[in-house]
Amino acid sequence: MNVRTWQWACWLISCLASVVACSPVPPALAHPESMAPQPPREFVDTTLYPMTGRTIRVAAGEDFQDALEEARFGDTIVLEAGATFKGPFSLPNKPSGGGWITVRSSAADRQFPAPGTRVQPGHAALMATLSAAREAVLTAEKGAHHYRFVGIEMRPEPGTYLNTLVWFGNNRHHSIDHLPHHMIIDRCYVHGDPRKGARRGVAMNGRHIAVIGSYLSDFKEAGGDSQALMGWGGPGPFKIVNNYLEGAGENVMFGGGDPYIRDLVPSDIEVRRN
């Protein structure tokens, strides 16, 4: 390197050092405490309100999908405990109205674990079962909302592998307004096949989604990640409280895939007592 080249190099380094020294420090770097995670700004309300509408009873051998189509907000669909209803099933998007559509087992309240209590596989005899041999057990239609499941077993047909048992949003909607919302799984037993497994239990790709007091197990897959709960296409809020969660890849995962809605980030996630 000749003298002139050396002088130019020294001058350039001096200029760069001056620019760095004079540049303002980003607030997050000047105050590292501002980079700490923020607590949720919004929470999912899982209060169990009295039902004000009709009771639609579905006995063994009857059509659960017909009951879903018939139900209106405030109604309760009561599935016969011990009966198995074979899907797949789709949750319709109902016209706006007050209240929820509750789907529950016919087991008496005094027999079943009380609200706030976590169920166990041993409670399956008190539950009604939803199963499927293809697609998924439950899928929410575009914009479907205000469904609550209480005391329901959800599983594949014996010896069947399902990718996902419950799709609360499939990450294919262009607007947040099109996402399913206000979905609650409360004291349910959701599990893959003991031998075949399943990739995941619940896809949480919507808004105001909660899984509480439930037991999710046997989510396993050879050659791929598997999760009890996963979300990547919904903004939240999400509530995951007082569950048993079993996934061979990740028990709970948010992210891992690109959301269909630009700049969407799953947020306001409450995870406690699992």
Image: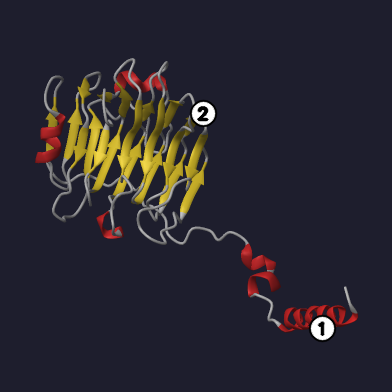
Q: Residue at x 41, y 33 (%)?
A: 200
Quadrant location, the N terminus: bottom right
Please tell me which residue lies in front, 113 or 1: 1
The percent position of residue 233, horizontal first and vertical second, equals: 38, 50
Figure quadrant of residue 5: bottom right
| Amino acid type of the residue tagged 1 in the rendering | Trp
Please tell me which residue lies in front, 239 or 87: 87
Please tell me which residue lies in front, 44 or 191: 191
Q: Is residue 58 above or below residue 263?
A: above
| Amino acid type of the residue tagged 2 in the rendering | Ala
Farthest residue in the right direction?
3
The residue wearing badge 2 is 248
Disc 2 crowd rating (10 Å Cα; few below 14, some 14-19, many 20+) is: some
- Residues under labels 1 and 2: Cα distance? 58 Å
Q: Residue at x 65, y 75 (%)?
A: 26
Q: Secondary structure at mark 1?
A: helix
Left or right placement of residue 21 versus residue 87 in this view? right
Q: Residue at x 31, y 59 (%)?
A: 176
Answer yes or no: is residue 159 visible.
yes
The percent position of residue 241, horizontal first and vertical second, equals: 46, 42
Figure quadrant of residue 138: top left
Q: How is the image coloured?
A: secondary structure
Q: Mark 1 or mark 2: which comes first in sequence?
A: 1
Figure quadrant of residue 79: top left
The residue wearing badge 1 is 11
Answer yes or no: is residue 110 visible.
no
Q: Secondary structure at mark 2?
A: loop
The percent position of residue 98, horizontal first and vertical second, equals: 18, 54
